[in-house]
Image (cartoon, grey):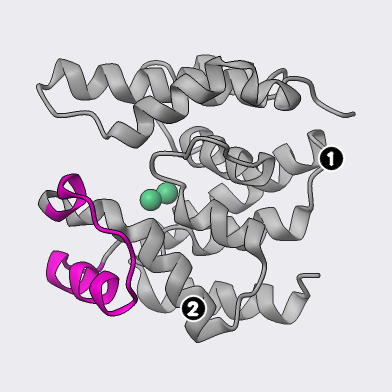
Amino acid sequence: MIDDVLLNTAKDYARGRLSEGRYAHSLRVANTAASLAKLYDLDLKKARLSALLHDAAREMGKDELLRIAKEEGLPISDFERERPVLLHGPVAATLACKELGLEDAEVREAIYHHTTGVPGIGPLALAVYVADKIEPGRRGSGVENLRNVAPKSLRGAAMAALEDSISHDERYGRPVHPKSLKTLEWLKSCGGERFDEPKV
Ligand SMILES: [Fe+2]
Ligand SMILES: [Fe+2]
């Protein structure tokens, strides 16, 4: 059970660690994630909490992200060693447990995996992943399509968002995170079908 005290503490925590712009993004993701949670019959408070905290480590420097990841025994792939910014989800999830006493496994998963998703991703984490891509401040090609798809199929929106981000990386000659590819593969398989329809 997530209570309002923890939600307010998370808000202050994110505000204290982020620039005004990124804090505003986190609030918009929280509102969007809550709307998706309502539609897909997920826990609204968990959705809000995950979204408030998802980018809490996004403004840490590379060295700090690597240091904390090492100290906390988080897995660091070669891919992440070269691009430590990709550790901001795992580091935020770990700090939320340590510093805010977060115990909820679904919230932890949603924060931890919000950048790439993960094969076997649960519905709450999927909603936060999609909310991060479609919050009202997001611009760019493909966003309108994601906004249209999200209320009809969470899984469909997540697949489209992953495809967009993979082709974006490919277009700019950037290597694609293997976890994004594996998540997309998993969602395309029968594994993600239970997220297909809104519950209300
Ligand atoms: Fe992020
Ligand atoms: Fe974000």
* Quarter containing the N terminus: bottom right
**Percent position of residue 190, x then y:** 64, 17
Q: Residue at x 61, y 53 (%)?
A: 30
Which label sits on residue 13?
A: 2
**Percent position of residue 82, x then y:** 10, 50
What residue sits right under mark 1 in the picture? 41
**Percent position of residue 134, x then y:** 52, 32
Front tag of 2 and 1? 1
Q: Which is nearer the eye, 67 or 157?
A: 67
Q: Is residue 164 above or below residue 38?
A: above
- Segment tinted magenta in the rendering: 60-81
Residue 158 counted in the magenta span: no
Q: Is mark 1 within 8 Å of ligand 2?
A: no
Q: Quadrant of residue 66?
A: bottom left
Q: Residues within 10 Å of mark 1 (few under 14, many from 20)?
A: some
Label 2, label 1: how many angstroms apart (C-alpha)?
Answer: 27 Å
**Percent position of residue 92, x then y:** 42, 67
Q: Residue at x 13, y 70 (%)?
A: 63
Amino acid type, label 2: Tyr
Dot 1 falls on a residue whose secondary structure is loop
Q: Residue at x 52, y 14 (%)?
A: 145
Q: Quadrant of residue 121?
A: top right
Q: Left or right of 37: which side holds 181? A: left
Amino acid type, label 1: Asp
* Quarter containing the C terminus: top right
Q: Left or right of 106: which side holds 63? A: left
Q: Left or right of 8: which side holds 118? A: left
Q: Residues within 10 Å of mark 2 (few under 14, many from 20)?
A: some
Q: Residue at x 9, y 22 (%)?
A: 173
Q: Main secondary structure of the magenta part?
A: helix
